[in-house]
Image: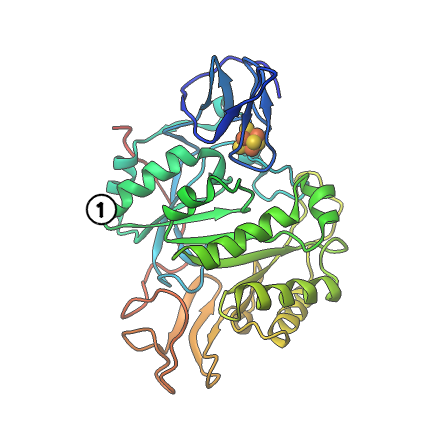
Amino acid sequence: MENIAIGDAVPGRYWQRLDDGRLQCDLCPRACRLHEGQRGLCYVRAREGDQIVLTTYGRSSGFCLDPIEKKPLNHFLPGTAVLSFGTAGCNLTCKFCQNWDISKARADDRLQSYASPEAIAAAAVESGARSVAFTYNDPVIFLEYAVDVAAACREAGVKTVAVTAGYIGEAARPEFFGAMDAVNIDLKGFTEDFYRKLCTGSLDAVLDTLRYVKHETKTWIEVTTLLIPGENDSPQEIGALSDWMMEALGPNVPLHFTAFHPDWKMRDTPPTPPSTLTRAREIARAAGLRCVYTGNVHDEAGQSTYCASCGMRLIGRDGYAITDWRLDVKGHCVSCGARCPGLFEASPGDWGARRSPILIAAA
Ligand code: SF4
């Protein structure tokens, strides 16, 4: 925490006053306790006088149309474009961060774009995006802005997607996830040691969030684990993670194993070999999970969707592009009629693998 001047700020939610005069932020399990002028670890929430404020409302690091598969979400409107943006800061400190230029950014360095919730929803409609994603950095820390954008999107008939580590306080979960139609939650490893050493976080808090979203909301959920050589990629750990998912979330929650590339404070760790991803996928499938994917590598077999009932390939993928579609208009297997879990339209989108930055007017 440090003392600095505050820029654009709106009142924040989920905090309490302590007997010693400090204000405690309860938005995430870190529970930062702030004196006047201090910011929390996430950098974007600060104490201003007698309240905690969000300092980045309405500001973003820029907007981009992405394939929904890039979030990654493989069972939520496949083939469609998603209007994606992030802000600055993060409430975890992952040494392997793959977006550190954003997550470690100070607001004034990065946040060049200003956009109202209504302008973002309108831009999504105009560009043909079926959803808006809060991504690149963790939207939990800009909850007030994300929730307002989500409300404007719902009004405009646009879905919302949160890409998050799930490190959020219990009190804030209903509001945050209630606003989202889909989430991808990072399950970064499956030991407390991993979370403590590499993220200064806690595994238990994330598992609680996963259970909450699956059982207490209608939000579609997929899970991503970035496999880091020597840190979280042992068959034992992957087996334990998969068994927990089967028991706590059931067989139909998709799990994505993605490849690490050396970055931020772990530049000496080698990239994940494709064989590690393939082995992880086999372990998870053997545990009973029905929708398991590899990511960040070229692997058509590992990125396609198969019918859990008859085994037919339902959605073929080559990277982020859809190459095959064997679902009927209601999202059922055309061969055996079994329903594929997720949200599907009568036909896939045709956005392909493109990535296209867009400008949004401030109003
Ligand atoms: S969101 Fe988390 S990291 Fe940020 S101020 Fe609140 S408790 Fe601290």
Say whether residue 126 is visible. no
Viewport quadrant of the N terminus: top right
The percent coordinates of residue 358 (x first, y second) are 33, 40
Viewport quadrant of the C terminus: top left
Q: In the image, is residue 354 above or below residue 47?
A: below
Say whether residue 24 is visible. yes
Residue at 33% across, 51% down: 131
Residue nearest the observer in this picture, 270 or 363 = 363
Ligand 1 quadrant in view: top right
Residue nearest the observer in this picture, 320 or 195 = 195
Determine whether the residue tagged by mark 1 lies in a helix, strand or loop. loop
| Amino acid under disc 1 | Ala
Q: Taking 325 as reference, is 264 left or right?
A: right
The percent coordinates of residue 221 (x first, y second) are 46, 58
Q: Which residue is mark 1?
A: 156
Q: In the image, is residue 199 above or below residue 325?
A: above
Q: Taking 156 as reference, is 280 left or right?
A: right
The percent coordinates of residue 48 (x first, y second) are 48, 15
Residue at 72% across, 61% down: 237
Q: In the image, is residue 241 above or below residue 133?
A: below
Residue 118: name its quadrant. top left
Residue 227: name its quadrant. bottom right
